[in-house]
Amino acid sequence: MRHTAPNGATTLVVTPTSVLSLHMDHDLLERVRHHAARGRTSVQDPVVRTLIRDDFDQRFRTAVQETERFHGPSGSEDGDQVRPSAGIR
């Protein structure tokens, strides 16, 4: 990744990375390739976005569960309130 300073100087910024190897069904790989081609990205991009989204979903579910545990189960005393996990699968 390149970073350009306000004075116009360009610096190469190296971020540490790791390698993840996946074994994938041929049909699935072709679908991912097609999806990536439509977005003009590499095959890696939709895979990484999916992993990030899944990680966010998991963290969000955990936060909702912690909130419900802290506040207790939603009672029926206030019909206007919706429990935090409503709509989460």
Image (cartoon, rainbow, N blue to C red):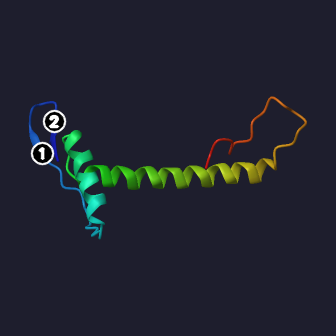
Where's residue 75, x and y in %? 87, 42
**Image-based side of 23 in relation to 40, left or right:** right
Answer yes or no: is residue 44 visible: no
C-alpha gap between disc 1 and disc 2 = 8 Å
Where's residue 8, x and y in %? 9, 32
Residue at coordinates 61% horizontally, 50% vertically from top-left? 89
The residue beneath circle 2 is 5
Can you say whether 17 is above or below 10 in the image?
below
The residue beneath circle 1 is 11
Q: Name, please, the residue furthest toward the left.
A: 9
Answer yes or no: is residue 37 visible: yes
Circles 1 and 2: CB atoms closer than 8 Å: yes
For marks 1 and 2 on the same chain, the one whose residue lies earlier in the sequence: 2
Which secondary structure lies at badge 2? loop
User: Which amino acid type is shown beneath numbered disc 2?
Assistant: Ala
Query: How many residues crowd around disc 1 within 10 Å: few (fewer than 14), some, or many (20 or more)?
Result: few
Residue at coordinates 76% horizontally, 54% vertically from top-left? 69
**Image-based side of 78 in relation to 25, left or right:** right
Where's residue 30, x and y in %? 24, 56
Which secondary structure lies at badge 1? strand
